[in-house]
Amino acid sequence: MRKRQLLVATALLVLICTACTNAGEETSGTEENEPQPGEETNENDDGSASQAEEEPPPEKEEQHSDEQIDEDVTSEDEEEEIEENVTEEVVDRVLEVEGDNYVLESSEYGFSLDLLESWRDITTITESNDAPDTIRSFSIFYTPDHTIEQFFFSIDVLPADYGPEYLEGSPWIYLGSTEQYMFSYNITPEPTPEILEPENEDKLMEIQSMIQDELPRVIETFRIY
């Protein structure tokens, strides 16, 4: 009787321990499957939960605004307009029309020279500072029909402290001086090969006449102010 009671008690103890062990495993499994606080889950089609993947931010596209393009176009137009104005100012300042004569005039250096009306269509005037020892040179070229470019003469501006004696032995011929500048002119030393061609004999005679007969009268009109 006593032995049977011990067996029953032992069997009962084993059952209790087994039940406790199974309950603990079920609790542990449930806790592993439960989402942690702050963790996002998504349900799949089969009802299972999966952690949501973060989508990468969209790439930024480079865009050129219409305003920037308009500003660039406006800037180019303004530069072209400024360039045209500068060219016109130089032409107006160098060559002005007065009656039947052309007037080569520079308010910057304070001189003027009357050019003949007959030279209007056969001469071209340029302004540069590339002549040796000069501050500025105003050169007149003989350009009949724009097929020949023959240097005719120039009005050259030099520093006043050079003095007239500086021109001795040079191709420059003294015209006058101010406190700042000394003025001279220079005649073409020789004809170009093109104008010496037989078919250009009439042009050669014309430029020779301009140098010998007309230029001395023009030089007499040189004025300093």
Image: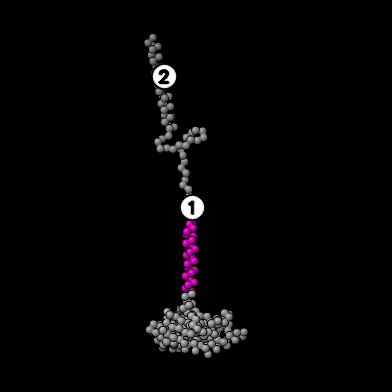
Q: Is residue 33 magenta?
A: no
Say which residue appears at 47% left-offset and 59% top-offset.
Answer: 68
Say which residue appears at 49% left-offset and 60% top-offset.
Answer: 69
Residue 102 rendering spot, x and y as whole percentages: 50, 83
Depth check: give the residue in front, 172 or 214: 214
Kindly identify the amino acid type of the residue bearing the numbered disc 1.
Answer: Glu
Q: Is residue 83 magenta?
A: yes
Question: Which residue was labeled with disc 1?
Answer: 61
Helix, strand or loop at label 1? It is: loop
Q: Residues within 10 Å of mark 2 (few under 14, many from 20)?
A: few
Residue 124 rendering spot, x and y as whole percentages: 52, 80
**Up-down relation of residue 151 to residue 61 (above or below):** below
Question: Which residue was labeled with disc 2?
Answer: 15
Helix, strand or loop at label 2? It is: helix
- Mark 1 vs mark 2, CA separation in Å: 70 Å
- On the question of residue 150 being in view, the answer is no
Kindly identify the amino acid type of the residue bearing the numbered disc 2.
Answer: Leu
Bounds of the magenta segment:
63-87
**Up-down relation of residue 101 to residue 18 (above or below):** below
Residue 16 rendering spot, x and y as whole percentages: 40, 20
